[in-house]
Amino acid sequence: MNIIDGGVTSAKGFKAACTAAGIKYKDRTDMAMLVSEVPCVTAGTFTRNLVKAAPVLWDRQIVESGALAQAVVVNAGIANACTGEEGFDACRKTAAAVQQICGFAPEQVFVASTGVIGAQLPVDKLSAGVAAMVPQLADSREAGHLAARAIMTTDTLPKEVCVEVEISGTTVTIGGMCKGSGMIHPNMGTMLCFITTDVAIKKELLQKALYETVGETFNMVSVDGDTSTNDTCLVLANGLAGNAPIETEDAAYEAFKEGLMAVNKALAMKIAGDGEGATALFEVIVKNAADREAARTLSKSVVTSSLSKAAVYGHDANCGRFLCALGYSGIDFDPDQVDMWFQSEHGTLQVAENGVILRYSEEKAKEIMSTEHFTVICDMKQGDAEATAWGCDLTHEYVTINADYRS
């Protein structure tokens, strides 16, 4: 597997475009479009928030129907959530605009939205945006990059990644883009992720691979503990790589899943590190837990803790906050067995042993925490299960951003 410079246009047969539709923002692009030259097998995972945005309902319907999709239209600025039948009709009309120009059936067109909850989408601007993007569709690296920029809201940078995987002698490409900075606490199975691949694979196996990798990547991210109404992760596979179709859980399937895992993990970490107002990526590794689910719950409890996140922001080596967050996770363990370390590019320092906080160097601890990627390692001494969660620090800027998000 090779990580390459690429994104959603890197796999064979995929094109992208973007435009400034003026949906909310007046000085930037705010719509993006992805199109495959041929129909695609699809997979998707969606928010488990009971309050689901109209695009989530629309896209889930397509994935579950088994329809071969060929396009994705995304807008930033308005989430199209809590908008009732009018909001769902906006999805329908957006797909109809694509059908009118490209000839794709509505059930072949995914739609996605991100932004303010409760506002209705201006359908005329969406339709005009589609009309503007179709002639610009291109398979260039730049087209994919600009599409990734267009779907940003409070993100500070576009998020893209691409890998090449060797499957039975054939090179398969998996590229992805996502957006997400605030209202990030995915439970899928506001984060949007779109993955394109030229692999030939059975739909059921594509869905299985996505579900399994999302659980270890996006669902292990928390910026602020808020699960969005719009969380969506879609994979489109058009089969143009020419590999022998993956139809069983064999070595080819495992190789593809490894590539998909790499893409999803890289994107998940980019989201965590770009949390609203964040200055640092906060990583928590739990080792030797009783089982996988316990490890996941423990690591996410620490990374979600507001007090822990504030300590990371202040470079305050108050490891008692991290131990406390383990304790209220709901997982049963022996507190008198837990060891803990701080780690970053500036070194590794043990701060607790057998549940007792050590007399460590505050200066060294502060140095380790003063970095853009800070890790807490927790050894539970219960079993051999391990999990990693990612988040970010909690800053004054986070409150500023969200106090006037609609203005």
Image (cartoon, helix red, strand yellow):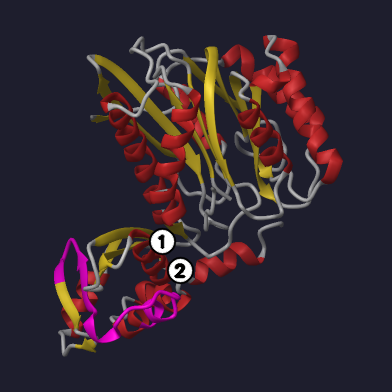
* Label 1 neighbour load within 10 Å: few <14, some 14-19, many 20+: many
Q: Residue at x 58, y 67 (%)?
A: 400
Residue 213 point in image, percent of width and height: 40, 43
Residue 212 point in image, percent of width and height: 41, 43
The amino acid type, in three-letter code, at marker 2 is: Thr
The N terminus sits in image quarter: top left
For residue 370, which numbered disc appears in the image?
none
**Closest to the observer, 199 or 281:** 199
Distance in Å between CA atoms under marks 2 and 1: 7 Å
Q: Which residue is mark 2?
A: 304
Element type at marker 2?
helix
Q: Earlier in the sequence, mark 2 or mark 1?
A: 2
Tell me if I can see residue 199 in this picture. yes
Tell me if I can see residue 318 in this picture. no
The amino acid type, in three-letter code, at marker 1 is: Gly
Residue 352 location, quadrant: bottom left
Q: Are marks 2 and 1 in contact (CB under 8 Å)?
A: yes
Q: Which residue is mark 1?
A: 391
Element type at marker 1?
strand
Determine whether 114 is above or below 196 in the image: below
* Label 2 neighbour load within 10 Å: few <14, some 14-19, many 20+: many
Determine whether 359 is above or below 185 in the image: below
Q: Residue at x 40, y 74 (%)?
A: 331
Q: Residue at x 81, y 47 (%)?
A: 83
Confirm whether the magenta stretch covers residue 88.
no
Residue 139 location, quadrant: top left
Q: Which residues are magenta?
A: 324-348
Determine whether 358 is above or below 372 in the image: below
Residue 34 point in image, percent of width and height: 55, 23
**Closest to the observer, 18 or 117:** 117
Number of on-image labels:
2
Position of 349 with respect to 127 (left or right) is left
